[in-house]
Image: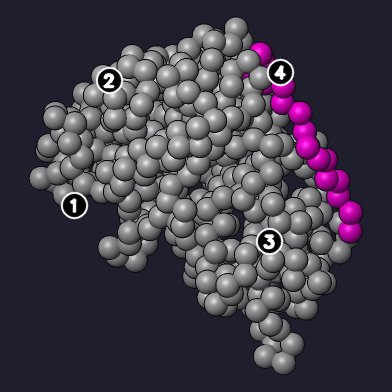
């Protein structure tokens, strides 16, 4: 029996087919091969076309089928992971009304800040666990204020994964986990937040049917099944944001367990059984995939917007035709600290861990007689690792003190420079696994469809590939303190 996982990323759509019996990936594909565009109609804005996501999804599924490593008719359930916090709006005919305002868009920051003040800091943090900030509710409020004609036509709002599920099934659903990442959920009362809906003037009718994460979110229609060579009627049995899903893929489900990822953005995500909130909302708390009112599991999320996107930008800026692996090999010859070159990697919108401030990225300490493109490439990766340390220290302030961090051996964790910098500057071991978001989504579908008897059974075969332990911690801590001083200077000058 096979499971199909779809990961709706910012850069591409990745799909994997997993054998439920062995829990091993049979085949994977992604589309497009190069990074998808982010549309920026104005500075600080970031949008993507939901129609493009759907076309990319169909192309990726066709591509993985073309591997001929399995029979598509043996796929029994579908799971979906997706980029978090995006806003998709449709009318009564399920037609998209505008481009999706995605996670790294900063236009709604002030709207969220005003809501935080009006609703009240204590109410927001104790009930929502977050400031409304730059999340989906604030983005919907921006549409209401600035595009009233669009707002009037809205029948339902969705996150990106909900849209793909709608295309597959014709049904629109959501979950407590999804609603919490949009800052629509009252954790104290375990219901939609009266304060948020009243303050923004939203009707609760725009919210789709609320289902458990692990459950049927509709069944693949006859027409779509024929188009995608799938069996009609199989369920979409799981939907979750990419970071809760990444944690699931690493079997991070219990209090104290922590996952990390470093794709376009970078995240550390830890699980707790308390309704934890940061006093400044610099890290954010959402319902985890296994959250239930009677058994609370809350995911505490640190997000850095500019990780892989900065790595790509530096590679493009320097005009290198070499592969990332080749560049990593060259940069390994540069000593830690990049001969005094430092990079602040904050060039992808407002950073929540910096109090929703847009600092932009900065390159500090350039010496024309000493520094090369290779120095810049290494300094960029070190700067990302230092940003992770800055955020992890905030999590530590809030009681999250991981003894080990689990990560998939993918994206920036493929780079020994980044990996060693991350481990040494955070002084925390990292376990690497051969897993990714699309595989996690497939396994989630197996849980939701009842193919696995329990969540634990779905990960019975998961084994670490490698354990990386800290070394040179004094050196990396000294470099971090220099980097942090530069960051504080930039924040002070804003």
- Quick check: 399 left or right of 225? right
Distance in Å between CA atoms under marks 1 and 2: 36 Å
Residue hosting label 1:
146
Q: Earlier in the sequence, mark 2 or mark 4?
A: 2
Q: Secondary structure at mark 1?
A: helix
What residue sits 67% from the left and 90% below the top?
A: 368
Q: Earlier in the sequence, mark 3 or mark 1?
A: 1
Residue 468 shown in magenta: yes
Instruction: Report the front residue among 359 and 167.
Output: 167
Disc assigned to residue 460 = 4
Q: Do the residues bearing badges 3 and 1 touch, measured as CB atoms within 8 Å? A: no
Q: Do the residues bearing badges 2 and 4 touch, measured as CB atoms within 8 Å? A: no
Please provide percent x and percent y for residue 170. Answer: 25, 23
* Rendered-image quadrant of the N terminus: top right
Q: Earlier in the sequence, mark 1 or mark 4?
A: 1
The furthest residue to the bottom: 369
Residue hosting label 3:
325
Rendered position, 338 above or below 20: below
Magenta stretch? 456-472
What residue sits 71% from the left and 84% below the top?
A: 371
Rendered position, 128 above or below 108: above
Instruction: Report the front residue among 202 and 19.
Output: 19
What residue sits 57% from the left and 50% below the top?
A: 263
Residue 73 shown in magenta: no
Please provide percent x and percent y for residue 312. Answer: 54, 64
Q: Earlier in the sequence, mark 3 or mark 4?
A: 3
Distance in Å between CA atoms under marks 2 and 4: 32 Å
Distance in Å between CA atoms under marks 3 and 4: 32 Å
Q: Secondary structure at mark 3?
A: helix
Distance in Å between CA atoms under marks 1 and 4: 50 Å
Disc assigned to residue 221 = 2
């Amino acid at each position: 029996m096979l499971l199909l996982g779809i990961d709706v990323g910012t850069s591409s759509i990745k799909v994997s087919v997993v054998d439920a019996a062995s829990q091993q990936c049979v085949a994977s594909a992604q589309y497009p091969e190069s990074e998808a565009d982010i549309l920026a109609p104005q500075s600080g804005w970031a949008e993507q076309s939901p129609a493009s996501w759907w076309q990319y999804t169909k192309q990726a599924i066709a591509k993985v089928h073309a591997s001929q490593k399995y029979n598509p008719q043996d796929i029994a359930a579908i799971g979906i992971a997706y980029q978090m916090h995006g806003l998709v709006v449709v009318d009564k005919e399920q037609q998209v009304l505008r481009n999706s305002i995605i996670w790294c868009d900063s236009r709604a920051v002030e709207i969220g800040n005003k809501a935080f003040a009006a609703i009240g800091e204590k109410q927001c943090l104790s009930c929502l666990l977050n400031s409304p900030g730059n999340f989906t509710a604030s983005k919907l409020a921006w549409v209401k204020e600035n595009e009233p004609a669009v707002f009037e036509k809205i029948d339902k709002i969705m996150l990106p994964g909900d849209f793909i599920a709608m295309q597959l099934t014709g049904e629109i659903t959501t979950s407590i986990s999804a609603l919490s990442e949009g800052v629509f959920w009252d954790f104290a009362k375990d219901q939609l937040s009266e304060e948020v809906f009243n303050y923004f003037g939203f009707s609760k009718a725009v919210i789709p049917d609320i289902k458990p994460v692990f459950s049927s979110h509709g069944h693949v229609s006859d027409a779509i099944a024929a188009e995608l060579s799938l069996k009609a009627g199989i369920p979409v049995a799981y939907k979750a944001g990419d970071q809760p899903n990444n944690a699931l893929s690493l079997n991070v489900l219990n209090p104290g367990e922590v996952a990390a990822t470093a794709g376009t953005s970078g995240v550390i995500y830890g699980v707790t059984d308390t309704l934890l909130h940061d006093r400044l909302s610099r890290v954010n708390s959402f319902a985890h995939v296994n959250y239930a009112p009677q058994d609370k599991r809350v995911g505490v999320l640190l997000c850095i917007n500019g990780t892989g996107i900065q790595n790509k930008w530096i590679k493009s800026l320097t005009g290198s035709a070499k592969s990332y692996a080749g560049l990593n090999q060259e940069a390994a010859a540069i000593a830690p600290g990049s001969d005094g070159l430092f990079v602040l990697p904050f060039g992808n919108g407002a950073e929540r861990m910096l109090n929703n401030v847009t600092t932009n990225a900065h390159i500090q300490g350039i010496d024309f007689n000493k520094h090369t493109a290779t120095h810049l490439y290494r300094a960029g990766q070190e700067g990302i690792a230092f940003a992770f340390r800055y955020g992890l220290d905030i999590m530590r302030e809030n009681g999250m003190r991981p003894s080990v961090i689990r990560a998939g051996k993918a994206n920036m964790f493929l780079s020994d420079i980044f990996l060693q910098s991350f481990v040494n500057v955070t002084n925390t071991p990292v376990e690497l696994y051969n897993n990714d978001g699309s595989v996690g989504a497939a396994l989630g579908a197996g849980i939701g469809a009842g193919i696995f008897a329990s969540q634990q059974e779905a990960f019975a075969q998961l084994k670490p590939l490698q354990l990386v332990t800290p070394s040179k911690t004094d050196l990396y801590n000294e470099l971090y303190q220099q980097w942090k001083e530069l960051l504080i200077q930039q924040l002070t000058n804003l």
